[in-house]
Image (tube, helix red, strand yellow):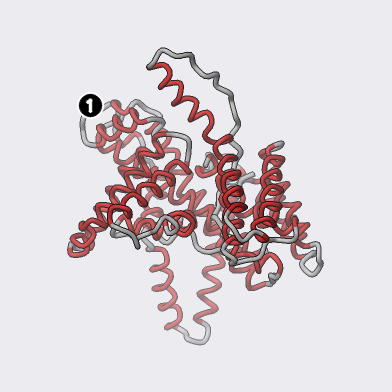
Amino acid sequence: MVFSSPIFLFLFLPVTLLLAYLSQRFKWKNTVLLILSVFFYAFGEGEMVILMFGSITLNYFVGKWVGRDKGKTAITVGIILNILLLVIFKYANFAIENLNLMLASFGAAQIQMVHIKLPVGISFYTFHSMSYLIDVYRRQNQSQKSYIDLALYICLFPQLVAGPIIRYKDIAKQIHDRTLGSHRFQLGLERFIIGLGKKVIVANSLGSCADLVFGLDPSQLTSPSAWFGIICYSMQLYFDFSAYSDMAIGLAKMLGFDFLENFRFPYKSKSIREFWQRWHISLSNWFRDYLYIPLGGNKVSPGRVYINLFIVFFLTGLWHGASWNFVVWGLLHGLFMIIERVGFGKILTKLPSPVQHLYTLFVVVIAWVFFRAPDIGHSWNFISSMFGMNNTNNFTIDLLWNREVGFSFLIGLIMAFDGFNLILRKLYKVIYRSNVKSGRMVFENCKTLFLLAVFIYAALTVAAGSYNPFIYFRF
């Protein structure tokens, strides 16, 4: 079940909000929300809910062990078991495939491939589980006594299948003590509608263009059409994932939870280092706090820092999927992080601001080719087409462009670089200055009408059954 589907918008969400508000004063409010979250997951994943509860049960008992044990044995066992779960269900076939390539080179017998279904959200709920164990080990929180409360933390539906990755220490108190009210509901609803609009109006429209371009042989593309295709994908990926995060944050707020921000206009960045401070913040912070710093962070020798960055970005790429394309994507970002740390970062700060932006966008967009293309060969051929090599010039940019794409592209550019908020601030000042007494009310009414229009348009589009995938569901 996705947030932008009719069954979620018109059935699951209203029922969930009603039951959450009716049960907020009772001790079993967490049980109600847990049942709803399990239904949300089981609706699309069916029997895979058993695997998720197997993981929850495992981490519940290991968490108690970690809470009692003052040594490293319990936390080591817990981390290994969680990683093993990921390896089996996400990377087993990838490992066998690559091992078979090695065996084939020696003429050895092949290992039989076994189809293992990738459970939606396994990367997210496994990282949530490890966050819980590590926070308990570090004595930042006590181990959870209530199985229901721990299960709710791990499978709370707003963040269950595509994040953000909410760390246990940031939400532990809210599980026991949270308040629901009209003001929080209003803020949450506004955030949800903004996310829904980003998803339906921008991501879906540009996504269809990106899919069309990447579905072709790269040799068919002209250089402009190849660039337009990857730029469309860059915007689709940002608006798709940030929209889901917006909707998750909005839903959580309506239910009494406060999630941390996951995106802060990453395409405004002036370096790759800054990009990772703005992009998928919950993941980058997770790797920073639970891997990079424990490895020594930047408090070790320069050579060891570079090794640490290599490890982190190798695993960041691999976390996104069992494919060498994702590994190359992660290592490209790691390489430029190292280049900036070696000395280029200081040079970069002395360059004009537009040059810094262009450098960052160039690296990010090139790296997205590996993120989107089906394999390494396709990635290199696509990049070749971007730079005018091996083109047959069959597919030109005019075959992609229409009014809907142009409108979505323009809105995407404005929102990606924080232009929408700038317009709102300017509008607020104009309205407020025109009539100080009623200016705020006029502004709020205009904003309400605008959000209502966005919701109606998005709801009608969703109801029509148009193109509507969520990219990060497969991670």
The residue shown at (26%, 32%) is 385
Q: Say whether residue 13 is left or right of residue 191.
A: right
Q: In the rendered image, which quarter is residue 368 located in?
A: top left
Q: Say whether residue 361 is left or right of residue 201.
A: left
Q: Name the residue under label 1.
A: 390
**Residue 196 visible in image:** no
Relative vertical location of residue 221 with respect to residue 157 in this rendering, above or below = above
Relative vertical location of residue 227 with respect to residue 10 in this rendering, above or below = above
Q: In the rendered image, which quarter is residue 83 located in?
A: top right
**Residue 282 visible in image:** yes
Q: Residues within 10 Å of mark 1 (few under 14, many from 20)?
A: some
Q: Where is residue 417 in the image (x, y as percent from the top left)?
A: 36, 60
The residue shown at (29%, 47%) is 335
Three-letter residue code for mark 1: Asn
Q: Position of residue 197 (x, y in %)?
A: 52, 54
The residue shown at (57%, 58%) is 134
Q: Say whether residue 7 is left or right of residue 205.
A: right
